[in-house]
Each structure stands twice: as structure tokens, then as C-alpha cells.
Image: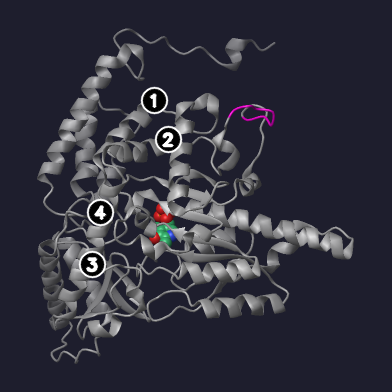
Amino acid sequence: MLTQADLRPAPAPLTSADPPALLGRDSAAAYRGLIADVAGRLAERFATVDKPWTGPAPTAIAPAVAAVDLDRPLTSFEDAFDEIGELYLKDAVWFHHPRYLAHLNCPVALPAVAAETVLAAVNTSVDTWDQSAGATLIEQHLIEWTAARVGLGPDADGVFTSGGTQSNLHALLLARDEAVEQVLLKHRVEAGTPLRGVEVLPRLRFFASPHSHFSVVKAARLLGLGEDAVITVPADDWFRMNPAALDAAIETSREQGLVPAAVVATAGTTDFGSVDPLGPIAEITAAHRVWFHVDAAYGCGLLVSPRHRGLLDGVEQADSVTVDYHKSFFQPVSSSALLVRDRSSLRHVTHHADYLNPAEAAFPNQVDKSLQTTRRFDALKLWMTLRTLGPDALGAMFDRVCALADQTWDWIAADSRFEVAAPPSQLSTVLFRLAGADDATHRLAREALAASGEGMVAATRVEGRIALKLTLLNPDTGLADIVPVLEALARHGKTAQEAAGMTTVPAPSAAPRRRDHRGPAREGRAA
Ligand SMILES: *Cc1c(COP(=O)(O)O)cnc(C)c1O
């Protein structure tokens, strides 16, 4: 017969000589030493970082990482820290550096970084009350604060998520299930026969502009709708959804027997920082009774902006809103939330498990409205930021980067080595090209820039052609930091052209002049 010892042999006992492995009452001194040591080493690192990136090729680092034998630990934390110093920190990408101008990554607020050490140490999981207590209330208070800033009304609710991708998926899941419920109900009343939800899925459609985030298409796929389920609504010259075209597209799909399930408006497109006209879109979604989701992953900083809040007018009519605090609220990854106008819509993700959150539970359990179960207490970071810096300071920082984008656009438009590739952004991106250069030249120039450590910029496509992109999210960056990066790009572009034997530089294509673009894109953005 099997004994307990056969099923699970007893481990060797720990000896008192072992260093403390876990954070607890007996490891307070070790904990304090460790944190102080890490803070010291990182502070030193931050003081000496002199470029946003060293630009290594994957092959330059991969052998050293692969050579680490994870079955043979080092003898001390210090040694392990030295090891990651080589494998990771030496070649890390530093978003706080003033010449990091590439993607939607921000330098992080100090109180949030400190809060991160608290939430990791306490290791709260914001899924049930009995794993979180005050943390649930703190998260909920922040949800209510954000919903009030949006203007969602008394029945609003929401939950923190891992990022905009998850928030969008969550929102579209709610929209899908609301739409399915309505179709099933209508069918039962009219046809008197039952219909299964899965039979409805192929008929559901989401509507979004060509500049919406790819996570919308991904969500459609994950939700069983298929990639064709996202209908692309044309945008205007300022990369904003055209409301009349949306109206027509919804009409057409209804005529085809399809079921419009959600409209996704983007408040701050990832490439252009354009804000879809939320008010007019809200009128259309209301008239057609279609779920109105606003993806404000990037533009959520406008919620605290002293100058540009008007750009979000209409957001208060949304059924759901995505906000990425880890973009324009200067929070460390991850920190995002999904907000909904009507808390009852969150029932679509509720599941009661006997062991966790039984239906008869008398406590607030955040897991009832989340896609996740075990979940980080990311809310603490935003809490500490708001309680120390305050919302106005965050908004002012976002305003600064928007103003910097204006200045940078002007500088580029005035220099004949460059051409602007898009009108001035409503938020903080700048799209441009090297005058007369082809796609390959742009690619080479961008790579050479990153490899040199002189700066980092992003690349995307505008009207089919490569364009370089600056995403400005560092309020400590100034034009004096950006100009040398642009100068370096021009230099690298010229070198690439010369190497390719392009002796005659083609005349620059007609660059949009600034005045041409002082158009509707600036509405709502106070002078
Ligand atoms: C960044 C972004 C997302 C995705 O958010 P993650 O936090 O990266 O998952 C979604 N929508 C827009 C408009 C974004 O800019």
C-alpha cells in the first residue's frame, strides 16, 4: 500500500546557515539591505546613462544569455545583479533619456516606482476581498475618479487591466455579448424558436478607422468573429474617423443582415495622435443603438490636461473607455483600465467559483469583473502618484510634450533636408521624411541612428511610404535634445544615399506647408 511518504517524499530540512529566501518577519534586515543595495546600484546607473540605447544586434547578446546555466545559481545577489548588469542593463532601452523619441513609452513618476516595490513586497492580489481588502477599495476609488473625469455618470464601473490590448478585448467582449443577447431576444420574440449565440457570431461587425490600434482586429479574432468582422471606416485628411462614412457603413451592414456590435473610436491614434470626433460618433452610435467604445490608451492624459481636455468632448457618452496610465499618466508598465458606463454590462465576464467568489459572497470581489484572476495591485502606483504629484502636474507634463511636438513640427517643416509626412498632431507625435529619400534610405538612417546611440526614433508607413516617427512623452525633453537627433538622421541618410550611388537627390515631393494644415485637427486644442 502507498504511504504518504511514497506520494511525496519529505524535503531536506533548511539549515540555519541558509540565507533567508523569502520576505517575512525574519528577513527584515536582509530585505532592507537588498532594496537599499538595488536602489544604490540603479541610481548609479541612471546617473551615468548617456544614451538611450547601445543598439546591439540580438546576436551580440544572445550567446551570453544562453550560456547562463540556470541550474547553477551564483553565490550572492550582488553577483546576480552584476550578471544582469551585463546581460540586460548595459544595453537596456532607456525611456527617460531625452533623446529616446520612438514609441509610446514614458519616463516613470517617482512615487509610482516606489509604490511598485510596495505592491511586489506585500504581493496583494486584487481578485477577491479576502486577498486584498483596502487594495480593492483603493483600486475602486481610482476607477470612480477616472470615470468621473470621463463623465460616465452614476452607474459607471471598471477594473484595472494589464494594458490597452486587454482593455480593448474586454470592452469588445462586453459589446459582443450585449449584441448577441439582443439578437437572441429579438429572435425568440419574432420567430418563437431558440437560436444559439454561436450562430450569431459570424454576423457581428465592429467599426473602426484605418488608424485604430491592431488590438481591435486581434480582439475580433479572439472573440470568434474573424478578421473580416472589423469594418474599416474611412478617415479624413487629419486621420480622424469620418462620421458620415460611419453612419453609411452601419446602414449598409444592417441592410446586408449583419449586426453592428461596436464602434471603436480612437482618442489618440498610435501613429498620428489624432482624436476621432467623439461627439458626432456618439450621436451615430446612439441613433443606431450600437455599443460605443473609445480607445483612449494614448489620449487618456487629456483627462488631466489643463489645456486640451476639450479634445475628448463626447467621451462622456461612451459605453466603454480604454485608458493606459502607462502611456500618458507616466506610470510604469503595467497600468491600464477599462471603464464602462453601466456596471451591469460587466456581468458578461463574471464567473462564480466555489473556492474563490461564490455567488452568495457579501464582499466586493474585483475578479467578478475582470478577465484575469490573480491580478497585480497596479492601482497603488497611480494612487501614490496622484496623492503626491496630483493630477494637474501630470496633465501639465502631457501638455508640455504636446507643445514640444508643435515646436518640432515647425522646425522640421522649415528645414529643406526634411519634409513633414503628416499635419501637426493633436497629441505628441511627429511624422516626417528625409527629403527625396526612398524607403531603404530611411530604414538605414534609422538603424544607423539607433546603433550610434545618438537617439531613437520610430518608423511607420504613411500613404504606403515609410515615414519616421517621433512619439514625445518625456516632459524633460526639449527641442535642443531633438535637433541633434534630426541632424544625425540627415547625416546618416546622406551617407546611405551616397553608398547606394544616389548622386542626384530627387527634388523633395511637395511638403505640406504648415498653414495648409492649421485645419480642423487643431479644434479643441486651445491656443
Ligand atoms: C498602445 C495602444 C494600445 C495597446 O495598449 P497596450 O497597453 O500596449 O496593450 C491600444 N490602443 C492604442 C490607441 C494604443 O496606442
Q: CA distance from mark 2 to mark 1?
A: 10 Å
The disc, 2 or 4, on the residue closer to the chain's N-terminal end is 2
Give the residue at x 82% y 59%. 195
* Mark 2 and mark 1 residues within 8 Å of each other at the beta carbon: yes
Label 2 crowd bin: few (<14), some (14–19), many (20+), radius 10 Å = many
Disc nearest the viewer among 3 and 4: 4
Closer to the camera: disc 1 or disc 4? Answer: 4
Tag 1 residue: 122
Spot occupied by residue 468 in the image (x, y as percentages of width and height):
26, 72
What span is in magenta?
Answer: 357-363
Q: Amino acid at mark 1?
A: Val
Residue under numbered circle 2: 377
> Which of the 4 image quarters holds residue 470?
bottom left
Q: Say which residue label 3 marks.
A: 405
Residue at image location 38% in from the left, 54% down from the top? 303
Q: Earlier in the sequence, mark 3 or mark 4?
A: 4
Label 2: which secondary element: loop
Q: Label 2 is placed on what type of residue?
A: Phe
Residue 484: horizontal and vertical position, in percent? 10, 66
Helix, strand or loop for disc 4: helix
Q: CA distance from mark 1 to mark 4?
A: 32 Å
The residue that disc 4 covers is: 396
